[in-house]
Image: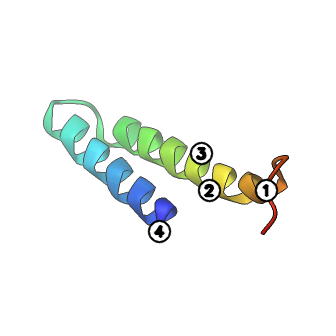
Amino acid sequence: MGLVLTTVAGLVVWIVLWALGSKGFDAFLITTALVLAGATLRMLVPFLPGRRE
């Protein structure tokens, strides 16, 4: 669920930046960075100390 929310937030940021005059590709790179950060954290959380799942 967290990855879905991260993706939606990234797309909202993309649309807002694009509407404010930023280039579409530049805003999309920010969205991609947010989604990659969310996916990386999702993969790393089970390996953190103190997590037993």
Question: Circle 3 is placed at which residue position?
Answer: 37
In the displayed structure, 24 sits above or below 11; it is above
Left or right: where does residue 22 sit relative to residue 49? left
Q: Earlier in the sequence, mark 4 or mark 3?
A: 4
- Name the spot of residue 42 as percent of width and height, x first: 65, 57
Q: Amino acid at mark 3?
A: Ala
Q: Amino acid at mark 2?
A: Ala
Q: Secondary structure at mark 1?
A: loop
Image quarter (top left, top right, bottom left or bottom right) of the C terminus: bottom right
Question: Circle 4 is placed at which residue position?
Answer: 1
**Residue at 72%, 53% in the rendered image:** 45
In front of the other: label 3 or label 1? 1
Give me the C-alpha separation between circle 3 and circle 1: 20 Å
Give me the C-alpha separation between circle 4 and circle 1: 19 Å
Question: Circle 1 is placed at which residue position?
Answer: 51
Which of the numbered marks, if any, corresponds to residue 39? 2
Give me the C-alpha separation between circle 4 and circle 3: 15 Å
Tag 2–tag 3 contact (CB < 8 Å):
yes
**Residue at 35%, 38% in the rendered image:** 27
Left or right: where does residue 24 sit relative to residue 45? left
Q: Secondary structure at mark 3?
A: helix
**Residue at 29%, 34% in the rendered image:** 23
Left or right: where does residue 4 sit relative to residue 47? left
Give me the C-alpha separation between circle 1 and circle 2: 18 Å
